[in-house]
Image: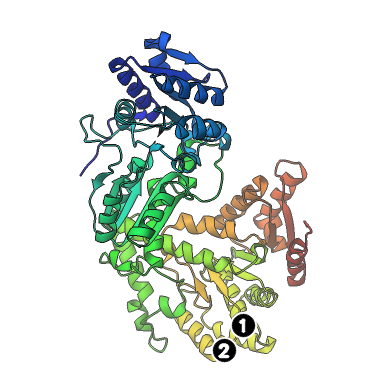
Amino acid sequence: MNYKNKGNKATKAGFGEGVLAAAQQDKRVVGLGADITNSVGMNLFAEAFPERFLSMGIAEQDAVATAAGLALGGKIPVFSTYGVFAAHRANDQIRISVCYNNVHVIIGGAHAGVSVGPDGATHQALEDIAAMRVLPNMTVISPCDATQAKIATEKAILECKGPVYVRFGREAVPDFTAEDQEFEIGKAQLMQDGSDVTLVATGHEVWEALEAAHMLQQVGISARVINMHTIKPLDGEMLNKAADETRMIFTIEEHQVAGGLGGAVTEFLAENHPIRVVRIGMSDRFGESGQASALMHKCGLDAAGIVNRVLEMVANDDLSIYIRKMGMPFNTYPKKLYNSKILYEGYDYHDESTFATCHDTQVYKHYIDQGKRGHEVRETLARALHDHFITRELYKMLDLYDEKDVIGIMGGHAKRRDDPQYRQIVFLSKKLTEMGRLMVTGGGPGAMEATHLGAWMAGRSEAETNEAVDMLMPSPTYKDEGWLCRSFEVMERFPLQTDYRSLAIPTYYYGHEPTAPFATDIAKYFDNSVREDGIVTIAKGGIIYTPGSAGTMQEIFQDAGQNHYESEGYASPMIFMGKDYYTNCMPAYSLLKDLSDRGLFKNMILTISDDNDEIIEAIVRFREGGSS
């Protein structure tokens, strides 16, 4: 079933229209406000029926008690305020005066969820469903769009018995349901059928769930979408059917996962039809200020966040049969990082011709044939899936290390194996690895390869390390015959015999350069921007810049900007290896030092040296709490 957005409209507007429509049909309907009439959708009623509207001031508890009295006197009171004030500040009066008496009072809870945006945590109702649904006699409704909010509110006023809490938002969101829709309080709506997983959503999340289901369909996952507009009473029949016919259920809400829709669904299914349920929402945290769309994305509550969570859980539960191979020569859901064995599968270093048919070469050929940006949606989706799972495994690895023990080495792309500085980098990396650091590079040739060779040789003698470098020297650059072959010869001569690891983050964008096989863990991406940003971001223990050209300059000033703003919470050392190069040839150090001295760039922790011991000292000093 296809749904089209008729135009964005706030659900608070639908609530207000519903109150007005009900009031036009029944003179017993009266309204109560708390000094925020326009903000909560009650202005239409107040303007049409001023004699039936009571402005109670900022006194939510008094307003609820008054509403209970009006209901006992035969009126149908509608009181609306922000959800955080209604559900929490006036909770005692709702519990005793309204629910205990089981009187027909309609309470509108506005500003639901993080999509409230700039108003921030104090005004973002994230616990109101939990607070309301546990109260005896209370009905809890959370409509998905403005049209449904109008219908639900009108029915809540004219057809319900007892207390009703109607939840709605402030932000204009897609308005996509039909005005003549079949809507019954307590009966969920099947928005889209599916056979693999079920997305049970409420409120604004229904549209996001429909968008996510469309995206999941492109990768072979059939997602059922249910609009659970009434959270109490819950539609158990719809849930039982979903549990029978799909293999996993996801609940999606702009609310704490504890006690809200997720709580209600898991409680019901645990007793009636046990099945794996994954709750998507706010996990024991408050909201924050920001643009609505940015907050939804940050909290994983937009369509992309839902897709990511579904794919993650599908992979974790070994349900990857849902994700088809899509005819690609690469795995769309890798469950671990690459290494030389996986990346160079099919390559026999005794026969250089086999490089043309190994796994990495075939993937790169496919990448070029399909275009670096991907000509088709399926290709783009497949690459994005691959990179998503690579990122997940990358951060699993990083979790094994203290973040200040992660050291990057950048630049030196053209560094030859017979260059003395290549050997120097090998020994620098070897020492740092032996000190417990995780060495990270872009995984290419030159200084990057030297870094991983040093980590590979960690624990071995100086003589053995020199022998390894000597074995590589006859093929000084990756363009020379035997470059890759000699790497494998070294690995065979000196097999890995320790638990030391190193991390390479290469990309198929530069796939014409073979990935350094000495790296024990290889996070190879299709998206070059993810990789470029990743190295600078994760190397929180500092970055050592070896002589490089334009690309290295870009990385240096990206790092400097990140340190200036302390984007990752604090600044990290920037260490320039090559005094003459970085003060005369490419005077990046000199420029940053001058900018720092003049206060134009802040938080610069700068070191320049040609000596390994001085470089290591700078890294250790920072790790131990020093700044330079």
Amino acid at pointer 1 = Met
Name the quadrant containing residue 361. Answer: bottom left
In this view of the protein, can residue 506 be seen by the observer? Answer: no
Q: Residue furthest bottom?
A: 493
**Tag 2–tag 1 contact (CB < 8 Å):** yes
Residue nearest the observer in this picture, 322 or 327: 322
Is residue 21 placed above or below 592 in the rendered structure?
above
Separation of residues labelled 2 and 1 (CA atoms): 8 Å
Q: Which residue is mark 1?
A: 457
Left or right: residue 581 compared with residue 197:
right
Residue 9 at x, y percent in the picture: 35, 28
Q: Which residue is mark 2?
A: 494
Is residue 624 placed above or below 484 in the rendered structure?
above
Under tag 2, what secondary structure? loop
Residue 385 at x, y percent in the picture: 37, 60
Residue 473 at x, y percent in the picture: 56, 82
